Image (cartoon, rainbow, N blue to C red):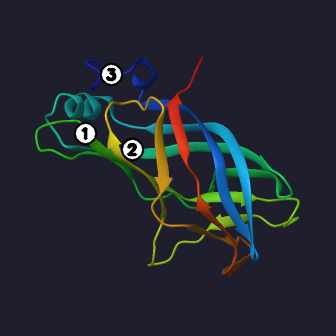
Amino acid sequence: MSFSKIPSSASGGLLNLGMFVQGAEVVVGATSYRADFHGKMKLQLEPNKLSQFLGGVISQIPLLIQELAWDGVGNIIGPITVRKDPDRNPPQSTLKGIVSGRSFPAVQDMVLSIHVTISNLLPGITLRSKISPNPGPAILRNSNVTNFPPQNDVYNLVEPMELEDVNNPGPVLATIRSFPLTVNPATP
């Protein structure tokens, strides 16, 4: 299934998305914790490229994450904030058709660079996603996109996301092992 026209929320080139996560697994030290999140994201896209993609003219469109704000909480781990890294822009995210000449099914990758705070367990420390050659930037992927914008679509981490201290990069202080993100268009 696809939309026959560009979603009105993307008409200016920005697509507002709402999202939630149930049961993310966050490891701090040797202890694994569960947390739930809710939040929003803004994706920048070119409306004419989206039209071409939806019409089957092109097989891939770039998406850029402009804003990201997720707030979570879990037993013992307490409140967690996740924001777009203000200092590092991630590589382009993409929406790519699987079958030549058809928009859907498609694979959508959301490439992330984030800042995370876990004030109960790591007070005064701002973490950031660690970017190294292996595995590289953090990617949330949906391998079976059937429409756009997403409607109750679930995205999962391709690889666990390691987090390092912004002020003391290198050592991994926490890891997000799973982050099953459900994405929907934002409600007004």
Rendered residue at 56%/61% (across/down)? 88
Q: What residue type is labelled 3?
A: Ile
Rendered residue at 69%/43% (across/down)? 37
Q: How crowded is mark 2: few (under 14 residues within 10 Å), some or many (20 or more)?
A: many
Quarter containing the C terminus: top right
The answer to which image quadrant residue 41 occupies is: top right
| Residue bearing mark 3 | 6
Nearest to N terminus: mark 3 or mark 1: 3
Nearest to N terminus: mark 2 or mark 3: 3
Which numbered dot is residue 105? Answer: 1
The answer to which image quadrant residue 160 occupies is: bottom right
Mark 1 touching mark 2, by CB under 8 A? no
Q: How crowded is mark 3: few (under 14 residues within 10 Å), some or many (20 or more)?
A: some
Q: Which amino acid does label 2 sit on?
A: Leu
Q: At which x and y percent is residue 70?
A: 67, 44
Q: At which x and y percent is residue 132?
A: 50, 77
**Circle 3 or circle 1, nearest the eye:** 1
Nearest to N terminus: mark 1 or mark 2: 2
